[in-house]
Image (spheres, rainbow, N blue to C red):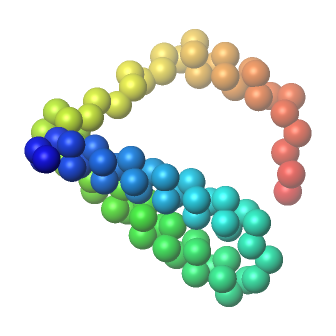
Amino acid sequence: MDEKTMVNDALASVKASLTAYTTAISECSNPNLRSTLQQIRGADENSQYELYKIAQSKGYYQPAKMADQNEINQVKSEFAGTPRWS
């Protein structure tokens, strides 16, 4: 297996674990477990970012192009009426 495949596989794996941690945190009623899961997710987020920087620097991964101001404004207007919970 080449380096590009390994880095991209690791990124996909971390992305899946972040999704799983987020789901578990949102459904967790035990404050201690919730806090622990949040700490683990934070560490995974840091790992994901480090892997991303490696992948991007080597040309293995190219992020989506940045949105222009019109696109940003369109998304803002679409969510402007969305209720927020506090």
Along the horizontal axis of the image, is 59 left or right of 14? left
Q: Residue at x 21, y 43 (%)?
A: 5
Residue 57 visible in the shown view: no
Please tell me which residue lies in front, 67 or 22.
Answer: 22
Along the horizontal axis of the image, is 17 left or right of 23? left
The single residue placed furthest to the front in the displayed view is: 1
The relative height of residue 34 versus residue 19 in the rendered view (above or below) is below
Along the horizontal axis of the image, is 19 left or right of 85? left
Quadrant placement of the C terminus? bottom right
Residue 9 on image: x %, y % = 30, 48
Q: Residue at x 41, y 56 (%)?
A: 14
Residue 81 visible in the shown view: yes
Residue 75 on image: x %, y % = 67, 22
The relative height of residue 29 versus residue 80 in the rendered view (above or below) is below
The single residue placed furthest to the bottom in the displayed view is: 32
The relative height of residue 55 versus residue 66 in the rendered view (above or below) is below
Please tell me which residue lies in front, 1 or 50.
Answer: 1
